[in-house]
């Protein structure tokens, strides 16, 4: 396959806009499959994972190859749920253009906004496809208007639908000024006369699209103003240049399920989407950070990016790789710049759904898969050898939004739990897990409830670990608000040597985030120097459990200023115990308080919901930091909110914004818990201690 005949497309859009069905229609229209599968029947080419089939929704990006008129189109079908936004990020990065699928009934939705913004951030050309125009209340004009209202880009339809809702039966190509009726669900079309009742609209839209195109080309503009006829091939060539340069977003229309408008979209992708050759050069950096440009050619040095890693309990690790320049051969090797290792390659595959086609070599523009690489994983840059090492900008993924505690239902599954979670985390950049020794819990974190419920299902299906899920405990801290002195004399007489350690300390608060500071002010040798570290060690042990609710202590300064020792009975352990007990006594007198983690939260929501969101944050003890405009006509609210109040915020935000809002958060600082809430936490902690002791 020649490089100029390759197209790499990310298929993105809101959940249930029909992306997976569109993939089926693309495959069916080109003869790759002999019947279209459906999401409801669980037999589509791109949703083949058991969890996807059971949930009837896409969870992972799948690669689909469509061959059309001598061209190979690799389509990366991405999930529509915001919980799996990382899949959209990696697929968009790996492709050369993005098709934004719009529901003809709903128009622009929240995930449309997010996926559009991702495409812009990676400077990818955009093509829109308004889908499901055969459905009740579908309206192409309203969908286009919602696009124009939401985005700043120059958005112009290049097609108009013939018929509406259940009568939708074809499209008018505005560039060709021709009408096509789809006579069956196999994508076969008949050219017909433009309907009389559409001629006025077509003239208006055709004038708009032609004027938009010629505005990007001076010579065409001159011909147009002089009244000269502009050929169709001139319009298409100029339009493609404008699309590639992101000056223009063409809008196509159709309905995937009855297979209307699909072959027109395919031709549009061939005509307007860039091939790897159209990108001209790959912009990378050498190891010193100097810019490097690589030609898109087989004889150039290799540059490839691993954009996705999957971990299967049976197949093992599978890496999906985009080749930007050079050639990678089967039974060859590459140098992994990111991991600083060489890896051998056995087999290269082109992937369509769950089908693998082995190839001898991969060249620029190929999206391939390689199994069982030992060190390589998502984000790694691959080159021929270390002397030609280059780097690419790393992926940026959002932080997890919610956390849950998980417990194995069967004893003895703890090892399988950690192994399974580690392997899932390797393939999912927005999933994290950790064992918290402080709370004794395994905590999983992800982008939302759906994300974490899929993780739990995967643990059962792939690793045989059944999990219970609960609300995680908050990692509170304790500190002091005043100075206080503590003294303890540890004296114990037994047969032989006894134990003796005597210390006097002063504790005082430190600024938030400073941790722990130990100051030795012993003079005159009242405590020998060799026992000073023992006192500090005992105090550090005391920091592990405060006096209020046994939470770790932070931000305190301890000064050791006096004490005594015994020539024979003093020992390291004696001064450790004396330091620990002296600290506890001092802390009791130093106005101890509970601290809670405060999160810096960024909430994106429609303007009409901003008041409700801010009211909800105030009810969660949040402090509003400010408000800004966000892409897609949304508003951004920034606030500081206690973590304890954010644990159940995600479903509430969905409710307040009808699923159009989302948020990110990161740790900011620790702050004092209000007295009333502190009393409740201490009481609850004491009850937990009683239960544990039983």
Image: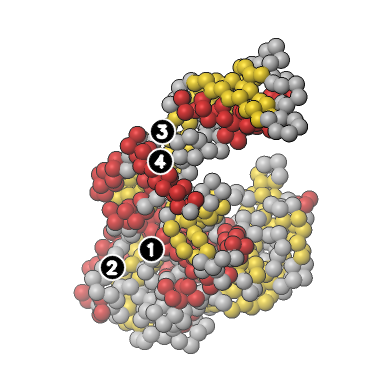
Of circles 1 and 2, which is in front?
1
Residue located farthest toward the left when viewing the structure as drawn: 197
Q: Specify whether 20 is left or right of 384.
A: left
Q: Earlier in the sequence, mark 2 or mark 3?
A: 2
Q: Please tell me in which quadrant of the rendered image residue 618 appears.
A: top left
Q: Is residue 40 above or below residue 467?
A: below
The residue beneath circle 2 is: 105
**Residues under labels 1 and 2: Cα distance?**
12 Å
Q: Which of the image's four quarters has the N terminus?
A: bottom right
Q: Please tell me in which quadrant of the rendered image residue 499 appears.
A: top right
Say which of 691 and 299 sits in front.
691
Quick one: label 3, few (<14), some, or many (20+) residues within 10 Å? Answer: some
Say which of 197 and 394 sits in front.
394
Q: Residue at (43%, 44%) from the top-left corner?
A: 686
**Residues under labels 4 and 2: Cα distance?**
53 Å
**Residues under labels 3 and 1: Cα distance?**
41 Å
Q: Earlier in the sequence, mark 4 or mark 2?
A: 2
Q: Residue at (61%, 24%) from the top-left corner?
A: 489
**Disc number at residue 682?**
4
Of circles 2 and 3, which is in front?
3
Of circles 3 and 1, which is in front?
3
Whether residue 134 is visible here, answered yes or no, is: yes
The residue beneath circle 1 is: 14
> Quick one: SS at disc 3?
strand
**Residues under labels 1 and 4: Cα distance?**
44 Å
The residue beneath circle 3 is: 672
Q: Are marks 2 and 3 in contact (CB under 8 Å)?
A: no
Whole-percent x, y for residue 479 in the image: 48, 31
Q: Residue at (48%, 44%) from the top-left corner?
A: 475
Quick one: label 1, few (<14), some, or many (20+) residues within 10 Å? Answer: many
Q: Please tell me in which quadrant of the rendered image residue 201 appears.
A: bottom left
């Amino acid at each position: 396959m020649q490089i100029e005949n390759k197209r790499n497309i990310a298929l993105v859009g809101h959940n249930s806009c029909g992306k997976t069905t569109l993939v089926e229609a693309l495959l069916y229209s080109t003869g790759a499959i002999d019947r279209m599968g459906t999401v409801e029947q669980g037999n589509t080419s791109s949703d083949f994972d058991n969890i996807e089939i059971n949930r009837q929704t896409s969870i992972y990006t799948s690669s689909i190859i469509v061959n059309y008129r001598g061209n190979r189109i690799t389509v990366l079908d991405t999930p529509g749920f915001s919980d799996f936004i990382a899949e959209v990020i990696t697929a968009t990065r790996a492709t050369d253009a993005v098709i934004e699928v719009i529901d003809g009934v709903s128009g622009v939705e929240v995930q449309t906004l997010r996926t559009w913004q991702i495409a812009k951030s990676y400077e990818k050309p955009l093509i829109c496809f308004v889908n499901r125009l055969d459905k009740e209340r579908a309206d192409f004009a309203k969908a286009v208007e919602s696009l124009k209202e939401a985005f700043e880009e120059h958005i112009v339809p290049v097609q108009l639908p013939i018929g509406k809702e259940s009568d939708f039966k074809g499209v008018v190509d505005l560039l060709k000024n021709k009408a096509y009726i789809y006579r069956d669900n196999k994508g076969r079309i008949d050219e017909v006369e433009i309907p009389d009742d559409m001629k006025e609209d077509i003239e208006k839209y055709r004038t708009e699209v032609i004027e938009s195109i010629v505005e990007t080309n001076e010579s065409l503009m001159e011909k147009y103003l002089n009244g000269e006829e502009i050929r169709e091939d001139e319009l298409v060539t100029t339009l493609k240049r404008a699309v590639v340069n992101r000056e223009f977003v063409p809008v196509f229309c159709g309905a995937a399920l009855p297979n209307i408008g699909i072959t027109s979209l395919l031709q549009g992708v061939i005509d307007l989407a860039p091939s790897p050759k159209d990108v001209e050069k790959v912009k990378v950096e050498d190891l010193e950070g100097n810019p490097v440009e690589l030609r898109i050619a087989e004889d150039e040095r290799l540059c490839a990016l691993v954009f996705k890693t999957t971990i299967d309990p049976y197949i093992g690790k599978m890496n999906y790789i985009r080749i930007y320049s050079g050639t990678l051969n089967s039974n060859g090797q590459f140098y992994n710049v990111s991991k600083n290792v060489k890896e051998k390659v056995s087999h290269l595959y082109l992937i369509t759904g769950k089908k693998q086609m082995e190839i001898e070599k991969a060249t620029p523009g190929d999206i391939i898969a390689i199994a069982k690489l030992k060190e390589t994983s998502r984000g790694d840059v691959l080159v021929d050898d270390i002397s030609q090492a280059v780097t690419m900008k790393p992926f940026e993924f959002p932080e997890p939004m919610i956390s849950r505690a998980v417990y194995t239902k069967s004893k003895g599954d703890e090892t399988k739990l950690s192994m399974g979670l580690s392997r899932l985390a390797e393939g999912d950049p927005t999933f994290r897990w950790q064992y918290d020794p402080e709370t004794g819990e395994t905590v999983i974190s992800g982008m939302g409830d759906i994300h974490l419920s899929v993780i739990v299902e995967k643990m059962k299906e792939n690793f045989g670990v059944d999990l219970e899920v609960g609300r995680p405990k908050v990692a509170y801290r304790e500190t002091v608000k005043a100075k206080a002195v503590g003294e303890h004399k540890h004296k114990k007489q037994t047969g032989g040597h006894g134990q003796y350690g005597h210390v006097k300390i002063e504790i005082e608060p430190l600024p938030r985030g400073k941790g722990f500071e130990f100051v030795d002010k012993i003079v005159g040798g009242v405590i020998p120097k060799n026992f000073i570290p023992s006192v500090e060690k005992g105090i550090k042990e005391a920091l592990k459990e405060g006096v209020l609710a046994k939470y770790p202590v932070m931000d305190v300064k301890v000064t050791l200023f006096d004490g005594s020792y015994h020539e024979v009975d003093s020992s390291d352990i004696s001064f450790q115990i004396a330091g620990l007990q002296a600290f506890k006594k001092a802390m009791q007198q130093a106005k101890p308080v509970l601290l809670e983690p405060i999160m810096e939260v960024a909430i994106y929501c429609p303007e009409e919901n901003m008041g409700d969101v801010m009211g909800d944050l105030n009810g969660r003890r949040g402090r509003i930091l400010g408000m800004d405009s966000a892409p897609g006509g949304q508003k951004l609210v920034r606030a500081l909110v206690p973590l304890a109040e954010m644990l159940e915020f995600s479903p509430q935000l969905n409710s307040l914004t009808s699923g159009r809002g989302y948020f990110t958060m990161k740790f900011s600082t620790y702050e004092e818990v209000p007295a009333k809430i502190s009393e409740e936490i201490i009481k609850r902690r004491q009850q937990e201690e009683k239960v544990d002791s039983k």
